Amino acid sequence: MSTAATPRTAPVYALVGNPNCGKSTLFNALTGLKQKVGNYPGVTVERKVGTAYTQHGQPLTLIDLPGAYSLAARSPDEAVTRDVLLGRRADTPMPDRIVCIADATNLERNLYLVHQILDLGRPVVLVLNMMDLAAQAGLQIRAARLEHELGIPVIPCEAANNKGLIELKLALSRHDLPLPRHAWDVPAALAPAVSELQASLIAADAKAPLVARAEALLLLTDPDPLRVTGSTPLSANTTRILESWKTRWTADATDWSGTLVSARYDAIGKLVAQIVVQPEGAEDGHAARASRSTLELSDKIDAVATHPVWGWVIFAAIMATMFFSIFTLAGIPMGWIEALMAAVSGLVDHVIPQGAFHSLVIDGAIAGVEGVIIFLPQILILFLFIGFLESTGYMARAAFIMDRVMSKVGLNGKSFIPLLSSYACAIPGVMAARTIEEPKDRLVTILVAPFMSCSARLPVYLLLIAALVSANEVPVGTQVGLMLLMYALGTGGAFFFAWLFKKTLLRGAPPLMIMELPPYRLPRFRDVLIQMWERGFIFVKRAGTVILALSIVLWFLANYPKPPEGAAAAPNQPIVEAVSPGPDAPRAEPAAAPSAVTAEDPLAYSLAGRAGRLLEPLIAPLGFDWRIGIGLIQSFAAREVFNSSMSVIFSVQESDDEAATRAQLRDAIRAAERPDGSKLFTPLVCLNLMIFYVFAMQCISTLAVVKRETGGWKWALFQLVYMTGTAWLVCFVVYQAGRALGF
Amino acid sequence: MPADWQTPAAFLAVAFAAVWLLVRAWRKRVRAASGACGSSDEGCGCGSLKKNLKR
Amino acid sequence: MTLAQLAVGASATIRAYPQAGPAFTRLREMGLLPGTKVTLVRTAPLGDPIEIQVRGYRLSLRKSEAALVEIAE
């Protein structure tokens, strides 16, 4: 990167605006691919920083702050925006300059946030985006007049068409950005309180004067001071002043918060009346009678898309297309990845002679990385769909349609997207929960999201269904039915636990569902592709670093220590006796063992094998033996590793033909026997194993993300325990009942 | 080259991977605890940003 | 009369709403203030939430929240 070339004083600009105002499009247009995406520590709100260049080639640092409607933040996203602008984040110093983006078709509400930001007294550039749509709606906006009124540069712009960017860059590179002339009178009833709070915030809380004023206004806007202050609690003095004013106002029935918000909207209304010329024939009253034509088109679409019948049909069709693409279309690039990895394996096989290192590279590193990277196409397709659905505006409609359903279990429509994403992978699903404002709803959504059967479970289901039924004996419908049953079980579990948590552990106010329904727009391919590229890059990077290292360590655990040289002749004595099975599993008496255990002996000797044996008493009541236990342990790296560990354990020869390998593995599993000679994978055990995979929390990556998202190990561990506990309990009941019924 | 160079090489790789994972986890803890950036999984680009902001 | 009782396609003016409910600050900040004109555009397929037009944009909210907003036709 060009850090060295960047002058130390490269100014930092923060991009701020309402959601759906075209902020990301503008950010992408200004920075192109010179972006770095990460997270704000502790909250995991996405953090985007990019470099833009002025017309003279000077670099500018741009921070794309999360979309917000108000500085009185309600969601973690909005809290980050507020904290950065108020200079509260240690990791992101206060930006030098602020670029406010307002949707020209909907100026009135967009200016509310701008109005709050002007209070901060920082240099501001105001961008009026979507001027083309405003013109289409017949709105004429006098930008020059607005510039005059506010005293800051106002740039009309069409970010989607790259119009107005040069003017914006010229404004950004101005050295003499004027401070806003912000003429706004705090209502007389509140003015003394604001100045008193401001004085106290300066003196007792060590805030800068203008920040203190903005914060004082926020404290009076939001009834809950804790939400305003976030992690920086108020000093006793300020709290006392605030409380005494609130007591006084409550006594004389002053609605302070309402007065303040109304005063802002009044000021904005006067401003808008001066700068927006309404189309001919528009009724008077509220100025922003905007975006007539886009709304008309949106209405036509919505008449179908949210229709009581067609709405569901379209919804189901979109979801079906998405799943179909994820499960089938992804197969083609997945084949390429498989072929590529096979070629790499072949090359390594050719170069390195047989031995420990050979095995490490092929069975450890390459197999491990492949097991994860194989899902890259699915992740990309998922984000392609999500990107399109978001940028067209359909996502908000999906939440609108689903809200009633979700409310039955105490969640809201916004929880729908995270749960949906979790069908592909719980990780993006858990991350998508960020848009949920209420912390408890967000937590419930995160806690239940991994119940949705993710794509990593799919290979396991496929294998076990194949082992359970044979295509030539049973109709295909049974297989599909079993698959659907697993998905239904997971979904049902998610809804049940969401309901349970909302009733008990995380009881709270009914969730809010205040959501803007933006007009439908054509998707921005560039934005969607950039988002996909970022996701893919992060995913591949993880596979190449953390997953690679983990795979190598896992390989070691499954291979060492090696059995002693002489042990091959009389293999099973020490181990089997060392871990004698509990009374639950009398079938596994060592005396009956010899033939069955010999083949797997090196594995039994390894650390993973020992762990499997250690686990056996625990899982024996579910019908699983220690070899399945190894698979379960290894599934913690990635669930689909179960398949490869089964193929290692039951020593299946890998062949070039994938279908043949799968068939072989299926046959090997069917042939697997317990020490007493009975079949290991009875239909009941197969079914039970699938049920275990539905419910159990077996994904370290998800746990790590949950830890990050919830800010600590507490909820991640809780999730591990309750999900795995549920899996155990359900499997115990199913197995014991099944046995009692004679299966 | 000795006959069995593979086992030590494999052990070396495993040790390297394990140490790298541990160091990584430790560094993340320290940085997160100090409130500095980078406590997330992905690089957040704040290193260069910070340099820009220091004046 | 409250916003929750408004018929589809009908418009009304917000009269007042009590300083209550978890949502009232945000609803106000989104521009629903006494004197503001609102139009009920449609309800979701299952009857809840509702979609309203306010200050030139579309907003959805649940009936339980809308029931706190008093309106006059």
Image: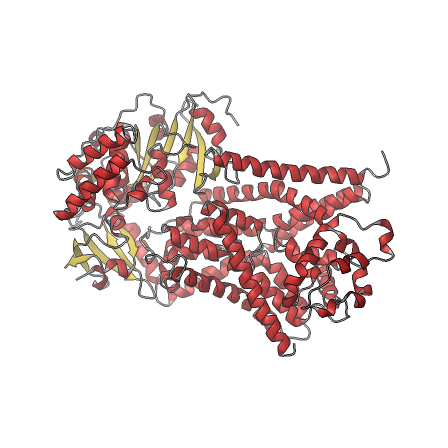
- What residue do we see at 17% from left, 58% from top? C71
Tell me residue B36's x, y (percent).
Answer: 47, 33
Place residue A69 in its image quadrant.
top left
A410 above or below B30?
A: below
- What residue do we see at 18% from left, 45% from top? A247
The answer to whether A163 appears left or right of A368 in the picture is: left
The answer to whether any part of residue C18 appears in the image is yes
The C terminus of chain A lies in quadrant: bottom right
- What residue do we see at 21% from left, 55% from top? C38
The answer to whether A309 appears left or right of A743 in the picture is: left
Tally of numbered discs? 0
A626 above or below A54?
A: below
Q: Nearer the viewer, residue A479 or A377?
A: A479
Q: Nearer the viewer, residue A471 or A743?
A: A743
Colour scheme shown: secondary structure
Tell me residue A437's x, y (percent).
Answer: 36, 50
Place residue A458 in its image quadrant.
bottom right
The answer to whether A352 appears left or right of A48 in the picture is: right
Place residue A684 in its image quadrant.
bottom right
